[in-house]
Image: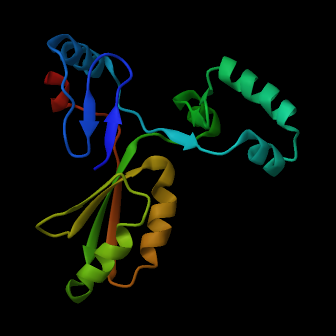
Amino acid sequence: MLAFKCKAKGFTLTKNEEPFLTDRQLQILKVLFEMSEQTIVFTIKKKQIDLAEGLDLTRQALNIHLRKLRDAGLIRTGRGFIDLTEAALKVLGVGTAEAFVFLKIHPPKREEVYEKIRNLPALDIYRVTGEIDLVAIVPQAQLDRFLEEVSGVDGVISTSSHIAISSLKRPWKNL
């Protein structure tokens, strides 16, 4: 059994079990959730020395650049990771919206196609009824890659992609 322990006074969490939370802790989580914004995070999990070598820089020079990028609000850093912020994605001209890709699958190939599509860069993939067989929710920044890879999957008859321009309702905000 896998167990996680919180150092702070509180709880032990075992796999597939919810932690015991006080009413105050639950209230804090709900307020944080209500105040939060849903984001897609692009994280780099690489040692700075490896990143520096790939960029043909010293680790010290890379560290100076990373500090300036962090101070400009373009990245967040921590032990073992670097996150690109939405501001960085805007500078790079990369969209952060979700794209919905509708896929029509050749019926005899469905299981084979489902298995291949599970490994593509999608946030969620749903089997649906009606004119289409699958709906994949893909970060806009990964849409080209997703479409390129899915076009090579034998059994995919057609795709149609749509990028979300705004959210009209987030029902989980009212928890």
Left/right placement of residue 129 relative to residue 161 reads left
Q: Can you name the residue that lies furthest to the top here? A: 24
Image quadrant holding the C terminus, namely top left
Residue in front for this viewpoint, 43 or 134: 43
Q: Position of residue 169 (x, y in %)?
A: 19, 31
Does any portion of residue 169 appear in the rendered image?
A: no
Examine the rendered structure and indicate whether residue 99 appears above or below residue 40.
Answer: below
Q: Can you name the residue that lies furthest to the front here? A: 1
Colouring rule applied to residues: rainbow
Q: Position of residue 170 (x, y in %)?
A: 21, 31
Left/right placement of residue 120 relative to residue 164 reads right
Does any portion of residue 9 appear in the rendered image?
A: yes
Residue in front for this viewpoint, 75 or 49: 49
Q: What is the quadrant of residue 174 in the picture?
A: top left
Examine the rendered structure and indicate whether residue 172 appears above or below residue 27.
Answer: below
- Tell me which residue sits at (61%, 31%) in the image: 79
User: How many labels, in total?
Assistant: 0
Examine the rendered structure and indicate whether residue 110 appears above or below residue 132.
Answer: below
Residue in front for this viewpoint, 117 or 54: 54
Residue in front for this viewpoint, 171 or 61: 61
Left/right placement of residue 151 relative to residue 136 reads right
- Tell me which residue sits at (55%, 41%) in the image: 43
- Tell me which residue sits at (43%, 39%) in the image: 40
- Tell me which residue sits at (41%, 66%) in the image: 119
Q: Position of residue 159 (x, y in %)?
A: 34, 68
Q: Position of residue 81 (x, y in %)?
A: 60, 37
